[in-house]
Image (cartoon, grey):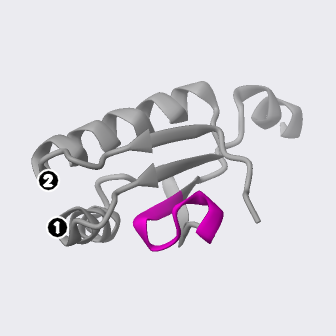
């Protein structure tokens, strides 16, 4: 089973620092573009997996509300799906007033 995602980011082969910077940049882009989800492929490097978990726990990426390991066809244990927090649009807030 594959899940449709709005964006993909392959961080295999990147250093820890570079990978986390690229991830933060892509998440900021996705937030601006109105994405709902991002697939992040880390490969087998445990440092990248630990870095992602540390980043999620740190509160530095508040736009991510949920995350899950990717299904096998999408990378399985080598990839994660990050889900953006739903933020009401300006028009929605004005409609409520």
**Residue 80: which disc?**
none
> Is 40 colored magenta in this rendering?
no
Q: Position of residue 40 (x, y in %)?
A: 44, 52
Give SS at disc 1: helix
Q: Position of residue 16 (x, y in %)?
A: 14, 53
Drawn side of residue 73 relative to residue 54, left or right: right
Drawn side of residue 14 relative to residue 11, left or right: left
Give SS at disc 2: helix
Query: Picture quarter containing residue 43?
Result: bottom left
Q: Residue at x 57, y 66 (%)?
A: 70
Q: Main secondary structure of the magenta part?
A: helix
Proximity of marks 2 and 1: CB atoms separated by less than 8 Å: yes
Distance between the alpha carbons at the discs numbered 2 and 1: 7 Å
Give the camera-side residue of 93 and 63: 63
Give the camera-side residue of 12 and 52: 12
Q: Residues within 10 Å of mark 2 (few under 14, many from 20)?
A: some
Drawn side of residue 16 relative to residue 48, left or right: left
Highlighted range, magenta: 72-81
Q: Residue at x 11, y 47 (%)?
A: 17
Give the camera-side residue of 52 and 42: 42
Q: Residue at x 48, y 63 (%)?
A: 80
34 in relation to 3, above or below:
above
**Residue 47: which disc?**
1
**Residue 16: which disc?**
2
Q: Residue furthest right?
A: 95
- First of labels 2, 1 by sequence position: 2
Q: Residue at x 52, y 34 (%)?
A: 30
40 in relation to 97, above or below:
below
């Amino acid at each position: 089973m594959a899940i449709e995602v709005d964006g993909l980011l392959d961080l295999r082969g990147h250093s820890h620092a570079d990978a986390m910077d690229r991830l933060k940049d892509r998440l900021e882009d996705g937030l601006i573009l109105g994405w709902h989800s991002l697939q992040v492929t880390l490969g087998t490097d445990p440092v990248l997996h630990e870095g992602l978990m540390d980043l999620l726990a740190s509160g530095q990426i508040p736009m991510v509300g949920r995350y899950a390991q990717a299904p096998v066809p999408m990378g399985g244990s080598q990839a994660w799906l990050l889900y953006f927090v739903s933020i009401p649009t300006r028009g929605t807030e004005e409609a409520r007033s």
